[in-house]
Image (cartoon, rainbow, N blue to C red):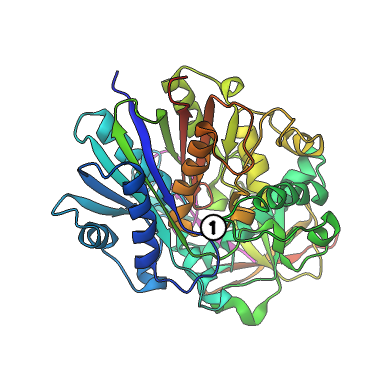
Amino acid sequence: MNITAKYCKNCDQILHADKNHCASCYSKELKTKELNGSGEVYSYTKIHAAPKDYADIAPYYIVLVDLNEGLRITGRYTGQSVEIDQKVQVEAVNKNAYIFKPVEE
Amino acid sequence: MTNVSVVGRGITKFGKKKDSIKSMLIDACKDALVEADRPRVDAVFVGNFASGSLANQEILGSIVTNELGLGNVPSIKMEGACASGGLAFRQAYQLVKAGEYDNVLVAGAEKMTGFDTETVTKAINHAMDNESNESASGLTFPGFFGVLANRYIHEYGAKKEHLAMVALKNREYAINNPIAQFTTPVELEEILNAKPITDPLGLFDCSPISDGAAAVMIQRGANGVEILSSGQASGTPLMQEVDDLLHMSATYSSGKRAYEAAGIGPEDVDVVEVHDCFSMTEIIAIEELGFFEKGKGWEALENGLTKHGGLVPVNTSGGLLSKGHPIGATGIAQIIQIVDQLNGSAANQVENPKIGLAQNLGGTGAYSTVHLLRRKGA
């Protein structure tokens, strides 16, 4: 699915969705930008010792993903196993968390 | 130039303790004051991370001044996650060097046991930027270093065994340190097969939950181990915004600033304490501080270059991994190990060291401090 990021109208920088100003030029003139949510896993971990709010879903994978359209984002991953360079796709945004699924090649 | 020296030190045993944060803090401070022959104290700085949320106690500065009869001298608590102690030490050093104070008592303390792990994990997560999708995804503080470790292994050909070698070395050092939390010998196999925490990191790759306090007296003049320089830097608190995950820029920059201010380089350093909150973090730190090339830190472990008889002994105290990691106390405890080494009185004493380095990291690279110290009269 698509996800919404931001970009700075002033300097064209692509920004994470939770930013309210551009750290380069301090402009608050941010526009939203739709990204297709697909990318490759830069790295990952499987969390066994989880904080209280996530204890009921542990163990779970966290992935750091380079989106094809140029942003690196952290999310959770629903596949059974994962490797670096694995192709993934956002399947949901759940309580502000990006949930990725594997893409079969 | 004004000399500034460490003239007294005090430290409690680290581990799971019955004592309150107050009693540990006072014990460590009292010992540091007595060792320094109780000079007039001009200010008190306390490093602490989570005494409010975990120990139900703030205003640690004034607790120290009151309990130790120091009158109405200025006091403050400083927070910089796991770098709280290093930050407090740096501010005290700078103010003495600048001529504002002659004698400053610097302490660090943390009370972390007595809660379930999920509660402590949640408290430690406060050391990340929590207003983001990253925190919402369930990334933990150790998880950041798990992600880093998997990429490091992928990029440089290291193996999980090399992470285990860090844990093993630091445990072997801790066995001889009377204040260390873990002094039972372990085998490499046991480390490799331990309970997983955040892959590829297992139980022994992660610093423990600990109680403890440490304190030093610093003083204008040359009457102790001399503080040569202090470097500090900040980094991004979000994993997804780090330029290069394998490069901890705060560690690098704080080291560079400290080396430049002292006019020396890594080749001049005889003994080192780095912030091994995780086994992976020690390998990154020895690279960033210039002891080994980027991507070669794991080979240094394999070749025994970071212990006695190698290039430079690292974490002779047992490190955070085995000495323990009462968060606010850690930065001061690292300074104490280096001071003890330079005074010739340390656990795992290195032969005749002249210069030592202590590096304290906060968050997942949000803060780093580096201090260089020199033996008295050297």
Q: Nearer the viewer, residue B250 or B304?
A: B304
Q: Is residue B300 visible?
A: yes
Q: Is residue B128 visible?
A: no
Q: Quadrant of residue B23?
A: bottom left
Looking at the rendering, the stretch of residues picked out in magenta corresponds to A1-18
Label 1 sits on what residue type?
Answer: His
Query: Percent position (x, y) of residue A75?
Result: 62, 63
Query: Percent position (x, y) of residue B51?
Result: 37, 66
Residue at image location 50% in from the left, 26% down from the top: B256
Q: Quadrant of residue B142?
A: bottom right
Query: Percent position (x, y) of residue B279?
Result: 68, 50
Residue A9 within the segment the image draws in magenta: yes
Question: Dot 1, crowdedness within 10 Å: few (<14), some or many (≥20)?
Answer: many
The quadrant of the rendering that contains the C terminus of chain A is: bottom right
Q: Nearer the viewer, residue B312 or B124?
A: B312
**Residue identifier under label 1:** B325
Q: In the image, is B72 to the left or to the right of A40?
A: left
Q: Chain of mark 1?
A: B
| Above or below, B114 relative to A4 | below
| Above or below, B92 relative to B374 | below
**Element marked by disc 1:** loop
Residue A45 within the segment the image draws in magenta: no
Residue at image location 65% in from the left, 60% down from the top: B182
Q: Residue furthest left?
A: B72
